Image: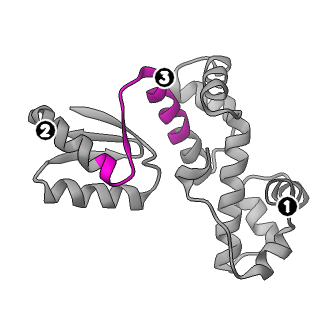
Amino acid sequence: MIIKVKNMVCDRCKSVLKDEFQKADIVVVKMDLGEIQFLDDASHRMDDIREILVSNGFELIENPNDTRIAEIKKHVLMALNHGVDRNLSEYLSDKMKKEYSVLSKLFSATEGMTIEKFFIRLKIEKAKEQIQMGNKTFSEIAYDLNYASGSHLAKQFKAITGMSMGEYQKLQQWDRKAWDQIV
């Protein structure tokens, strides 16, 4: 039995849920971003599964459009983390076996922003994370995030955060959003 889970976007999320399901004696076969596979006999424990998800800030996705949105977010996050070397629209179309225009319209209508803006916000949060770690130059961060230049990242960073990367670095009281809080 496979279920889709809203807001399960990082390894910490997966770890929390694995622990909770283990405590409840519910066997997880496989867990991926936004998706959990249980033993086939877990279907009779759906109330328990739903309760564990909700009590930990997650949500069971049952609507097909919500499932597609969760998949889009998962693939966009994977594109960011793995440095996809091709156009995001082509990547998503290929991964989801759907025309990008269909995916884009659904995402925009549901989330109130385009996939591209969502991707840029994720990149800015990743840039914030790397600035906090302090072991890379701004140019290296831009390169890691597949920006054509450091100035392109700097412009987007300022547009999203309202401050330059240097100003953000000096703050020392960093304001970062969790991956699942981007939209």
Q: Residue at x 22, y 58 (%)?
A: 20
Amino acid type, label 3: Asn
Q: Could you tell me residue 54's position as x and y percent?
A: 33, 47
- Name the quarter where the N terminus is drawn: top left
- Residue on which disc 1 sits: 162
Q: Could you tell me residue 29's position as x and y percent?
A: 20, 45
Please, is residue 69 above or below residue 138 in the view?
above
Please, is residue 57 above or below residue 95 in the view?
below
Q: Residue at x 53, y 50 (%)?
A: 180
- Tag 2–tag 1 contact (CB < 8 Å): no
Name the element at disc 1. loop
Q: Camera-side residue: 56 or 91?
A: 56
Q: Residue at x 47, y 50 (%)?
A: 9
Q: Residues within 10 Å of mark 1 (few under 14, many from 20)?
A: few
- Name the quarter where the C terminus is drawn: top right
Name the element at disc 2. helix
Q: Quadrant of residue 99?
A: top right
Q: The magenta stretch spans which residues? A: 53-74
Q: Residues within 10 Å of mark 3 (few under 14, many from 20)?
A: some
Tag of residue 65: 3
- Residue on which disc 2 sits: 45
Amino acid type, label 2: Arg
* Residue 5 is a magenta residue: no
Q: For the residues marked 2 and 1, what is the alpha-carbon distance in whole angstroms?
A: 47 Å
Tag of residue 49: none
Q: For the residues marked 1 and 3, what is the alpha-carbon distance in whole angstroms?
A: 33 Å
Amino acid type, label 1: Gly
Pointer 1 or 3: first along the chain: 3
Pointer 2 or 1: first along the chain: 2
